[in-house]
Image (cartoon, rainbow, N blue to C red):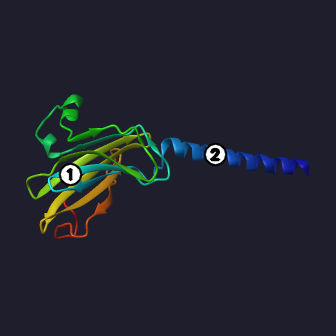
Amino acid sequence: MFVLVGAAATVVQFREDTLRERALRSFLVGDQSNPPFVTLIPGTSTLRVLVSNDSDYPIQIMQVRLWNPDDFVAVPNLTLDDLMRRSLVFRQPGFLAPRSAQVVGSTPLPAQTSAKYAATIMSTLGEWRQQFRLETVSGKWTIATRLTNGYSDDWVEKKVDSFFPRNAKGKIDW
């Protein structure tokens, strides 16, 4: 009888330790299923750049970079310094509290009626890439964005404005 009670207590203690370790790891690392993401907010002449954390855990040691992918197409052999100099917004917020957002910069709105942007977010949670398409519809900017983990090609649409233009197949031309 005492052996069974002792074994059950050991199993319960092991489970509690495992749950504590998982909670501590989530607190230190973050929630993989709810990564940080960038939001672009068009104003009258500038595009504000926010980074958001919708998870229940803080995100530490972050770096956010926004750039125009068309700037890199025709330029071979860029160094890391070249890449950083071409960033439209580059910021290291350091810490982002749970369920919060932080303005990390701004950039002028494009003169044309459509634009592409890309962002990279690096944190203890890992690296996330995000693509943006901006189009004007009836004089207002609409935005579509999608997100992927690291260098994966498994993109998830994060947010698409309801009036964002689609191609003949109903898809977004990323």
Going by the image, does 103 lie left or right of 109?
Answer: right
Give the image location of residue 20, x and y in percent: 63, 45
Give the image location of residue 25, x and y in percent: 55, 43
Sequence order check, earlier mark of 1 and 2 = 2
Q: Considering the numbered disc 2 on the image, is that residue within a helix, a strand or a loop?
A: helix
Mark 1: amino acid: Leu
Question: Which residue bears the numbered disc 2?
Answer: 20
How far apart, in angstroms, are the residues tagged by discs 1 and 2?
42 Å
Going by the image, does 4 lie left or right of 31?
Answer: right
- Categorize mark 1 by other alpha carbons within 10 Å: few (<14), some (14-19), many (20+): some
Residue ID at (14%, 51%)? 109
In this rendering, the label closer to the viewer, 1 or 2: 1
Question: Which residue bears the numbered disc 1?
Answer: 47
In this picture, is 94 found above or below 147?
A: above
Residue ID at (24%, 50%)? 48
Going by the image, does 171 lie left or right of 151?
Answer: left
Tell which residue pokes out farthest to the front in this image: 44
How many numbered marks, from 0 up?
Answer: 2
Q: Is residue 79 visible?
A: no
Tell which residue pokes out farthest to the right in this image: 1
- Categorize mark 2 by other alpha carbons within 10 Å: few (<14), some (14-19), many (20+): few
Mark 2: amino acid: Arg
In depth, the one of 44 and 78 nearer the eye is: 44
Residue ID at (69%, 49%)? 15
Q: Is residue 49 visible?
A: yes
Quadrant in the rendering for residue 157: bottom left
Give the image location of residue 114, x and y in percent: 13, 57
Going by the image, does 95 lie left or right of 39?
Answer: right
Give the image location of residue 85, x and y in percent: 19, 33
